[in-house]
Image: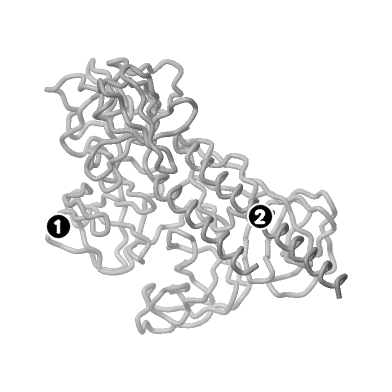
Amino acid sequence: MKKVIQLIILILILVSIPLISNADIGMPGVLEYDVKVINESGAKLKAYDNKEITVPYGTILKVNCELNINGELCAWVKYNNSQYEAKMADLGLVSEEADISGLEEVNIKMYVYDEGAYLYKGPSKTYSKVDDNFQLPVGETVNIKYEDDMFGYVEYGGKKGWVYTYQMKFNSPYNEDSALVYFPEDENTKICTLKETECYTSPRQIGDDMGNPLREKADFTIPAYTDLKYKYVYNIGHSRLVCVDYNGKECWIGQYYNYDVAYNCENRDISAYTAKDLTIYKNAVYNESEALGTIPKNTLFTPKYVYADEHGVEICCYVTFNGVSGWIGQSTSNSDYDTKILLNSESYMSNDIYVYEHQSLSELPIYDAIDGNLTGNVIPTGTVLTQKFYYSNYPDTWYYLCNDQYQGWIKSGKQTTKVSNRPEHLEFPDDKETATNTNDNASELDLEDSDENNQPSGISSIKTVIVGCIIVTFIIAIIAIILVKKVNKNKNNKNAEKQ
């Protein structure tokens, strides 16, 4: 039996490794475009299991993702309803210009910050330039009418074409970052440095190292706890750089989720809740920081500044409580690492806020606080409420739910009734229509409007195939274990009968 289980585990590993290693899920997708095989010997296509097929000269394929493999431009292509990896050197465009009919307008404003903003005839540098001698002028604001993960369609000065907008050089199939930057998503652009902060003259990367992206440093730094306003944004994955003016000097500073910058919460519907007693410190990055006072567990407050890491796990806030102002929260460098501050929204960096609704499946008793006392009131079966706070404290999960009639904490765990929920996107004036959900408990939610639905078809197909293969493998493993147990049981019964 033990050998069978070991064999099944080995099969799982062997199946999963090639699938995951070849997925390149993190690569940016492109609007699909048609190519044909131009290599007279045919083009080799590699499947997820590393098996190769050769398709003949002239075969039409559809590109939905470009990637760089060992310095060579490659692509995920669709052939016979399956995904394959192909070398772009073996492929040529079917049409010299991309078809924009049927595309949905996004109309996003971007600022041309640097030189190199050429226009292409399609959303790929495989297409030729509209004009080799024309670039979007530095200092101009342009409207992105259509977009994919890497390019935006622009009409400017009588020219029309696709400009490269992707801002992560280390993840780019062309090993380049964009000359364009974004404008802030909302009007509140106030931030506060949490430590002495390095500045850069440009957001663009000058090195090729993914782990240590080099940028040209300015000859000055910004002191800790300096209030600033930013005017441009450069997105680099989960992190970003923002352009600020410090003492009349324009520079870029990073927000890398390591206690660099906190965001101002003025004019935002942000509230917070303490899940344990917390010390109020003089500084946010504590390092032997002076303790000023305490704020008790189960305190609802409105923070002035909020910092959170990319997972919403490490959170610190600037708070005033009983006349004492200072910082509470978590830092890897102090003893309060286990502290819990709950935010009513983790999307405090923009106007995009996800609201989760729950529907009770049975009567739910209401508590007055986390680990608190029962109030004697219950939420009737079938009641729909909005989640304001969420707190996971194994084996219990706490939700603060409210509507016009009911409000309070409910406990959902192994011994309690689970609730169903769904997200909604609240739109604000001048708000971008797309949002990224970063809520830690998203895995527990029924995400009807999942970001996965907005992925280019190539990326979505990759995820589907990988998940499908792994699920099938596990099912086979479970069936095999059941069969082995039955065989062993039959053997034991026969041996017993003989005795």
Please provide percent x and percent y for residue 202: 19, 48
Please provide percent x and percent y for residue 83: 44, 33
- 159 or 175, nearer to the observer: 175
User: In the rendered structure, which amino acid carries the disc numbered 1?
Assistant: Ala
| Identity of the residue drawn at 17% across and 29% down | 137
Q: Identify the disc placed on residue 387.
A: 2
Image height check: is 202 above or below 113?
below
- 155 or 119, nearer to the observer: 119
Q: Identify the disc placed on residue 321.
A: none
User: In the rendered structure, which amino acid carries the disc numbered 2?
Assistant: Gln
Residues packed near mark 1 inside 10 Å, few (<14), some (14 to 19) or many (20 plus): some
- 462 or 484, nearer to the observer: 484
Please provide percent x and percent y for residue 126: 25, 26
Q: Which residue is mark 1?
A: 218
| Identity of the residue drawn at 23% across and 53% down | 252
Q: Is residue 410 visible?
A: no
Residues packed near mark 2 inside 10 Å, few (<14), some (14 to 19) or many (20 plus): many
Image height check: is 13 above or below 224?
above
Please provide percent x and percent y for residue 281: 42, 79
Residue 291 as seen in the image, left or right of residue 135: right
Label 1 close to label 2 by CB (< 8 Å) = no
What is the basis of the colouring in this image?
one colour
Spatial CA distance of label 1 from label 2 is 44 Å
Q: Secondary structure at mark 2?
A: strand
Image height check: is 16 above or below 49?
below
Quarter of the C terminus within the rendering: bottom right
| Identity of the residue drawn at 49% across and 51% down | 15
Q: Is residue 488 visible?
A: yes
Residue 357 as seen in the image, left or right of residue 373: left
Residue 210 as seen in the image, left or right of residue 395: left
Q: Secondary structure at mark 1?
A: strand
